Image (cartoon, rainbow, N blue to C red):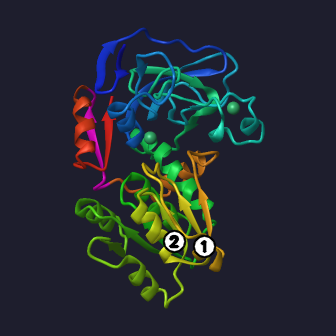
């Protein structure tokens, strides 16, 4: 079967590898759509995300059709469309025992050093990793469930309430996902901050009433103005740069929750006194832990439009996707298998 294999920085090859068979408790999936994200870019341009021997199969954001099931599998059946939750937690370390498999010390991820990946014709995952998609949702939405769950969890970590004012920094896939999650959870007063014009346009086309360019606008003053000085109680930093973090603290109301859901490439400085005087909570959100089915439900209810920010790329042209994403020429590229 055809697969995209990662051999090292700048070296992904489309090759033939043996087709896997399901074992007890696992399901075999024909991959249909697989999205690429910043983590894939990091792996491609910088280096492997795990110590697994190379090559490894690429692809952790994917959907597929169940084509075979191992013994004892009861929750999904052959022919069903599924979204894959790609984590393989160890199940025995302290975080796993505490119910935090996303923080597992030994976690493997399908497509990032785990046993297989979404960018192969077929792959085998544990039964609980396959989430059935309801009628009306296609493989394109299915492949978005993983990144949208990252963003959904980040928003949940802010404990949003209807009526809250919210600010999201970053208009990439996770920022867009946070904007859509806030809407799904009944928070309508959302400001998105994004420096790239194409991304601002895409977020605006999704219905965001206020999309600010931080290069042209004093974001903190603008948000304070709009909220009669109070600031936003929900703040999500999906941009991950010192300027966004600083502005995130600046727009936060008293007792706000500021959620970081980005890989910061450099340290940030702030004065804890500013945080203390408003009793701010800076919390972080990593990966997902139980958000898949809620996201799928919101998708089925039509709360995750894909127009204007998700673009399909044929399997054979996937190697061009890395440079296009790196140059900022696309927001979310979905490899169509
Ligand atoms: Zn990803
Ligand atoms: Zn573990």
How far across and how far down the image is residue 170, in percent?
39, 60
Residue 61 point in image, percent of width and height: 44, 37
Q: Does the magenta stretch include residue 1?
A: no
When asked about the image quadrant of residue 13, the answer is: top left
Q: In this picture, which residue range is highlighted in magenta? A: 307-315
| Residue topped by disc 1 | 275
**For this view, does 24 lie left or right of residue 171?**
right
* Whether residue 44 can be seen here: yes
Side (left or right) of 246 relative to 214: right
The residue sitting at 26% across, 65% down in the picture is 201
Name the residue tied to disc 2. 249
Left or right position of 238 against 25: left
Between 188 and 273, the residue placed more toward the observer is 273
- Ligand 1 shows up in the quarter that is top left
Q: Residue 334 carries which label?
A: none
Would you say residue 300 is visible in this rendering? Answer: no
- Give the crowd class for mark 2: few <14, some 14-19, many >=20 residues within 10 Å: many
Task: Name the quadrant of the N terminus.
Answer: top left
Is 310 part of what is drawn in magenta?
A: yes
Q: Is residue 235 above or below residue 144?
A: below
Q: Give how far across and how far down residue 301 sits, in percent.
A: 50, 57
Residue at 23 percent of width and 64 percent of height: 197
Circles 2 and 1: CB atoms closer than 8 Å: yes
100 displayed left or right of 48: right
Instruction: Give the mark nearest the N terminus, 2 or 1.
Output: 2
Q: Look at the numbered disc 2 and give the secondary structure of its residue.
A: helix
């Amino acid at each position: 079967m055809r697969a995209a294999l990662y051999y090292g920085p700048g070296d992904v090859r489309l090759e033939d590898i043996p087709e896997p068979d399901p074992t007890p408790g696992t399901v075999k999936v024909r991959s249909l759509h697989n999205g690429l994200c910043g983590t894939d870019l990091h792996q491609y341009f910088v280096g492997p995300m795990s110590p697994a021997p190379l090559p490894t199969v690429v692809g952790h954001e994917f959907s597929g059709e169940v084509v075979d099931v191992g013994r004892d599998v009861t929750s999904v059946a052959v022919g069903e469309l599924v979204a894959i939750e790609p984590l393989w937690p160890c199940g025995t370390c302290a975080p796993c025992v505490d119910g935090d498999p996303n923080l597992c010390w030994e976690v493997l991820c399908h497509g990032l050093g785990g046993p297989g990946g979404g960018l192969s014709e077929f792959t085998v995952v544990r039964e609980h990793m396959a989430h059935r998609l309801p009628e009306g949702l296609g493989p394109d939405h299915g492949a978005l469930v993983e990144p949208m769950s990252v963003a959904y969890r980040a928003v949940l970590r802010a404990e949003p309430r209807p009526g809250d004012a919210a600010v999201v920094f970053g208009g990439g896939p996770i920022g867009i996902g946070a904007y859509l999650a806030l809407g799904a959870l009944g928070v309508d007063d959302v400001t998105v901050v994004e420096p790239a014009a194409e991304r601002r346009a895409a977020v605006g086309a999704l219905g965001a009433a206020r999309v600010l360019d931080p290069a042209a606008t004093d974001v903190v003053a603008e948000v304070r103005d709009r909220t009669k000085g109070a600031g936003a109680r929900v703040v999500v930093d999906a941009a991950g740069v010192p300027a966004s973090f600083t502005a995130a603290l600046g727009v936060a109301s008293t007792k706000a929750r500021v959620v970081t859901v980005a890989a910061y490439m450099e340290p940030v400085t702030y004065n804890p006194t500013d945080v203390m005087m408003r009793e701010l909570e800076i919390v972080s959100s990593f990966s997902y832990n139980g958000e898949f089915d809620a996201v799928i439900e919101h998708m089925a209810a039509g709360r995750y439009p894909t127009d204007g920010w998700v673009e399909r790329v044929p399997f054979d042209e996937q190697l061009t996707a890395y440079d296009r994403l790196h140059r900022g020429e696309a927001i979310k590229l979905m490899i169509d298998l």
